[in-house]
Image (cartoon, rainbow, N blue to C red):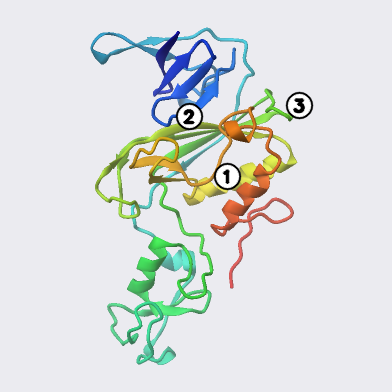
Amino acid sequence: GSTSLMILDNLYAIDFATMEQTNEQTGFRRRIRPGGALGPQPHGGMGQAALALPVGNGARRRVQPRTGGGSKRRLLEEITFKSHEGHIDFATHTNWRLLRPEEYDAEADCPITCCPYGTDTDDPVVKLSCDCIFNRSTVERALLNKPQCPLCHFKFPLPGSMPTGTMTLFTDDEPCEGHVATPTYILHYRFDSGTQGPQHPFPGEPYHGTERMCYVPDDDKGKRTVSLLKEAFHRGITFKVGTSVTTGRTNVVTWALHHKTSRGGGPQSYGWPDPGYHDRLAAECAAHGLLLDDAGEIMTHGP
């Protein structure tokens, strides 16, 4: 038999024959872990989430499940990312400098527009920290589309297009598959639904939020991975508004970086064990200009 339950405001189809739950928004399926906590409570509380069973006229009846039997979660940190809505302080993030007319050739062509720089004080010429020169309005549009120099491709740590959301980091003692006696980091992401801004595919149109739980073993490699994921969330590059690969739904908050959404089952279940995951995640972050040094610290570099 099967039924539908609301868990942490997400609708799941529960199949009791296979003991699997399927998120009806994302289409993602995972096995049900007996006795495990379903998610963090509001304001960082621990334990299982209340379920909402459908009753007449679409109302929901709150049912508090039995507690106990699971590994207690410990709250470590909560990070909030505020969407920039297209308003970015490019001067600070790129360390550009406004050039005086005598510092550049006004007849030379801007490498983006192929038109002379000119001497228009309303659209001054700027020199980025990578030494490339552009008209300010032109390079602002280019950087909003892609956070790198349009000419030399140097990557700048500009805030990404991710909508406003939160990342809550927990740890517990239940190990991931293949990581015996190793605690686990739990990353809980939450994004409310909202309206797309100028940095999104369809400004002014609504988008659908999401809520995800992800897992990383708390070992040496896992610590580096979690450091990358925390900084990625700070920079707004973890999620994006787009089309879900699993469901084909458009205008939804979906992954921009790959995560492990199950403690077990291997790569085919988006779970552990997966020895190559840490290196793949590091490569994805590096493509955004996000790197760690040998000591596990975020690298800050520039020309």
Judging by the rendered image, the residue that carries numbered circle 1 is 229
Q: CA distance from mark 1 to mark 2?
A: 21 Å
Instruction: Mark 1: give few (<14), some (14-19) or many (20+) Cα within 10 Å.
Output: many
Judging by the rendered image, the residue that carries numbered circle 3 is 180
Residue 56 x/y as whole percent: 26, 8
Residue 152 sits above or below residue 89 on the image: below
- Whether residue 129 sits left or right of residue 56 in the image: it is right
Instruction: Please name the residue shown 45% across and 72% down the image.
Output: 150
Q: Are marks 2 and 3 in contact (CB under 8 Å)?
A: no
Instruction: Please name the residue shown 39% across and 61% down the image.
Output: 145
- Quarter of the figure with the C terminus: bottom right
Foreground residue among 245 and 203 = 245
- The disc at residue 28 is 2
Foreground residue among 280 and 93 = 280
Instruction: Please name the residue shown 39% across and 71% down the image.
Output: 139
Q: Are marks 1 and 3 in contact (CB under 8 Å)?
A: no
- Whether residue 108 sits left or right of residue 299 in the image: it is left
**Residue 140: quarter of image:** bottom left
Residue 33 x/y as whole percent: 59, 17
Residue 2 x/y as whole percent: 44, 11
Q: Are marks 1 and 2 in contact (CB under 8 Å)?
A: no
Instruction: Mark 2: give few (<14), some (14-19) or many (20+) Cα within 10 Å.
Output: some
Instruction: Mark 3: give few (<14), some (14-19) or many (20+) Cα within 10 Å.
Output: few
Residue 95 sits above or below residue 70 on the image: below
